[in-house]
Image (cartoon, rainbow, N blue to C red):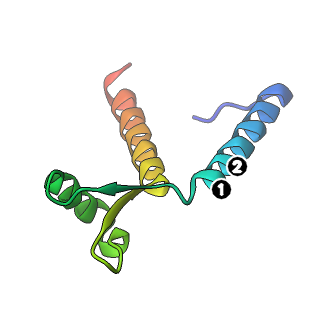
Amino acid sequence: MSKVLNAEEIAIKKEAEQIEKTLTEYLSKVRIKVDKVENADVIEAIDEVFGSRFVSNHNNIYITYEMYSKCLDLIREIGAAYAEEHIK
């Protein structure tokens, strides 16, 4: 069930959305290279979750802000679904 927001809550939500947009813009070029030898399990997980589009032309793999953000969103969604089902 959705809650109706008052004017102050709407303003805060809009400000938070703008901050998120700005952060995404500033952090969109941040990449962390994953060592293929030491982090083979991480590379396997990246390939499994995100596919080969995150593998560069030189066969390098990077964790990007987009990937980080998507993982956080997924964790939030799973947490909310779990809480809704198990907390009453």
Tell me if residue 26 comes above or below residue 82 in the rendering: below
Closer to the camera, 16 or 11? Answer: 16
Image quarter where the N terminus lies is top right
Disc number placed over residue 25 in the picture, else none: 1
Give the percent coordinates (x, y) of residue 55: 32, 71
Disc 2 vs disc 1: Cβ atoms closer than 8 Å?
yes
Closer to the camera, 33 or 51? Answer: 33
The secondary element bearing badge 2 is classed as: helix
What distance separates the C-alpha of mark 2 from that of mark 1? 5 Å
Disc number placed over residue 68 in the picture, else none: none
- How many labels sit on residues? 2
Q: Is residue 37 left or right of residue 23?
A: left
Give the percent coordinates (x, y) of residue 31: 45, 57
Q: Is residue 4 left or right of residue 42?
A: right
Tell me if residue 63 comes above or below residue 72 in the rendering: below
Kind of residue indicated by mark 1: Glu
Kind of residue indicated by mark 2: Thr
Q: Residues within 10 Å of mark 2 (few under 14, many from 20)?
A: few
Q: Is residue 79 left or right of residue 34?
A: right
Give the percent coordinates (x, y) of residue 70: 44, 52
Tell me if residue 41 comes above or below residue 80 in the rendering: below
Residue denoted by label 2: 22
Residue occupying image coordinates x 19% and y 60%:
36
Q: Residue 3 lies in what quarter of the image?
A: top right
Closer to the camera, 70 or 10? Answer: 70
Q: Residue 44 lies in what quarter of the image?
A: bottom left
Give the percent coordinates (x, y) of residue 82: 33, 32
Residue situated furthest right in the rendering: 7
